[in-house]
Image (cartoon, helix red, strand yellow):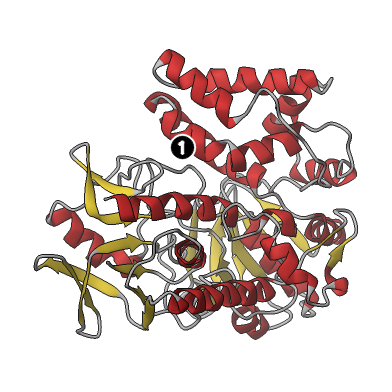
């Protein structure tokens, strides 16, 4: 069996590692990616040390079933300068995590080679396919490569230029790597950053670290900052568990979101804690600076609501998501995606302290309700919210919406849809079978095509955390050989 993996980011690394540790191995693997930095994806390219991993090592392993894999790799490196004292954990630069992904990929390729599986990397995008007994992948460079199984592991792509600013002097559509983009911004410029999530935080923190003296304004529709991560505490749920979720689904035919909330209530009650404290914090739409200050003070809070919820989203979420009723999945996608994403990937205290200091100093500002940003003919930009104001530089820090197709992959997805090898999901992305991640067409799985990560709208709610990708990759491997 020859497997084609389309994309060479974290999802591809997880898949290669899972293949290397499987009971059965393919005869060959070809990985396709035209990006300049293999295995790192968009977030983990070589960059400035200010751009840190936004999670502690125990929840960043890319090897399925081995939560300590990244932690052990990191133990061989000096990361004492990157200790987040409030978390009690080292938060290495993202470039260092990129090295971990590279090392994991190389180790997996070497292991596969020892069992007779040749891994080849083609530095080009896949633009289409045809059938000739098996799938034949067409690359942008004109190659035609036959494969028995193909896996879409393409990530979410670059930010979208929602205000039509591409080409305007001073506009940066893709902020990463910040070493290339932020360091070129004049120190006295008023910088408008589109977005107020983790990428916007990276931009603000890095601008401050590189000596920027002009104002920095985060502009977004909501004006909300991410939640602040709390010091990890060991939790062993007894109510909100994968087994309990499966049992409820089997008993009722489908899982209701209200049932998950009831299990969460029971879990907190077992800890002697109340649900309303958690609910009030999640619903708070008040002053974001007051909220940030309060959450920084609560890093060591004995109330485990947010800790428990963050863990459940990562551990139980992938199991619960495909079992949920369609109406509940639609509700969570449309009304609560940003909140749940922020709960599962909160801002680390190290960055939160810097952001609060910048806000208190007046160097950093938050503005909600942005409706339009225009490039002025003579240079600079006009930002419209409840008034109109000027900025010298604009950086786009809004990640693509969930389940969107990266622009480089759109020709291939179009070919798959036209050939009946894939089926669009109403929420975006492609339909995929849970666990095996086979592409679903007309309610039946396709034997050739598989979907891993962001494009699998049916199977995943949040597809960016490495342990989640690792678990999905391990399930997918079984489907490759069973198909």
Estimate the x, y position of residue 458 in percent, counting from the top left. Answer: 37, 40
User: In the image, what residue occupies the spot 63% across and 85% down?
Assistant: 184
Q: Is residue 41 visible?
A: yes
Left or right? Give the position of 235 relative to 444: right
Q: The residue tagged with tag 1: helix, strand or loop? A: helix
Where is 11 relative to 40, above or below?
above
Q: Residue sitting at 68 percent across and 35 percent down? A: 309
Residue 276 percent coordinates (x, y): 75, 20
Query: Label 1 belongs to which residue?
Result: 333
- Of 168 and 222, nearer the camera is 222
**Within the image, what quadrant is residue 70 found in?**
bottom right
Residue 430, image x, y percentages: 31, 48
| Residue 195 image-quadrant placement | bottom right
Residue 392 seen in the figure: no
Q: Residue furthest left?
A: 132
Characterize the local packing of mark 1: few (<14), some (14-19) or many (20 or more) Cα atoms within 10 angstroms: some
Q: x and y percent of residue 167 in the render?
A: 42, 78
What is the quadrant of the N terminus in the image?
bottom left
Task: Name the residue nearer the viewer: 62 or 322.
Answer: 62
Position above or below: 481 against 307: below
Query: What residue is shown at x 17% (from left), y 62% (from top)?
Result: 415
């Amino acid at each position: 069996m020859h497997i084609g993996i389309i994309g060479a980011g974290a999802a591809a690394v997880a898949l290669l590692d899972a293949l290397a540790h499987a009971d059965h191995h393919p005869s060959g693997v070809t990985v396709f990616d035209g990006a300049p930095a293999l295995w790192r994806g968009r977030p983990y390219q070589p960059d400035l040390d200010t751009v840190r991993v936004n999670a502690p090592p125990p929840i960043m392993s890319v090897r399925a079933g081995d939560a300590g894999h990244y932690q052990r790799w990191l133990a061989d490196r000096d990361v004492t300068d990157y200790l987040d004292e409030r978390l009690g954990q080292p938060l290495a630069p993202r470039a260092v995590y990129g090295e971990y992904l590279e090392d994991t990929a190389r180790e997996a390729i070497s292991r596969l080679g020892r069992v007779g599986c040749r891994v080849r990397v083609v530095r080009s995008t896949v633009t289409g396919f045809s059938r000739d007994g098996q799938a034949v992948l067409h690359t942008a460079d004109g190659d035609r490569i036959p494969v028995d199984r193909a896996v879409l592991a393409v990530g979410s792509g670059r930010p979208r230029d929602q205000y039509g600013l591409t080409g305007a002097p001073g506009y940066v559509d893709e902020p990463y790597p910040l070493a290339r983009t932020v360091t070129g911004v004049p120190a006295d410029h008023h910088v408008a950053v589109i977005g107020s999530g983790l990428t916007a935080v990276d931009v603000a923190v890095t601008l401050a670290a590189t000596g920027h003296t002009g104002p920095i304004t985060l502009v977004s529709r909501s004006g909300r900052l991410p939640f602040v991560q709390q010091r990890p505490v060991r939790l062993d749920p007894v109510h909100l568990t994968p087994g309990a979720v499966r049992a409820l689904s089997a008993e009722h035919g489908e899982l209701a979101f209200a049932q998950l909330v009831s299990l969460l209530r029971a879990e907190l009650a077992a800890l002697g804690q109340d649900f309303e404290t958690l609910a009030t914090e999640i619903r708070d739409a008040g002053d974001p600076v007051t909220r940030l200050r309060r959450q920084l003070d609560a890093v060591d809070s004995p109330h485990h609501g947010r800790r428990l919820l963050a863990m459940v989203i990562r551990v139980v979420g992938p199991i619960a998501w495909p079992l949920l009723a369609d109406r509940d999945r639609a509700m969570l996608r449309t009304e609560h995606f940003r909140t749940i994403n922020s709960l599962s990937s909160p801002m680390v205290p190290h960055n939160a302290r810097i952001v609060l200091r910048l806000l208190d100093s007046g160097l950093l500002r938050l503005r909600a309700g942005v409706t339009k940003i225009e490039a002025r003919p003579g240079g600079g930009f006009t930002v419209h919210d409840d008034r109109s104001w000027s900025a010298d530089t604009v950086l786009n820090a809004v990640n693509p919406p969930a389940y969107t197709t990266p622009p480089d992959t759109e020709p291939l997805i179009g070919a798959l849809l036209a050939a009946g090898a894939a089926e669009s999901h109403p929420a975006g992305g492609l339909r995929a079978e849970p666990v095996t991640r086979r592409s679903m067409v007309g309610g039946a799985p396709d034997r050739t095509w598989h979907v891993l990560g962001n494009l699998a709208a049916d199977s995943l709610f949040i597809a960016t955390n490495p342990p989640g990708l690792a678990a999905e990759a391990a399930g997918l491997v079984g489907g490759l050989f069973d198909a």
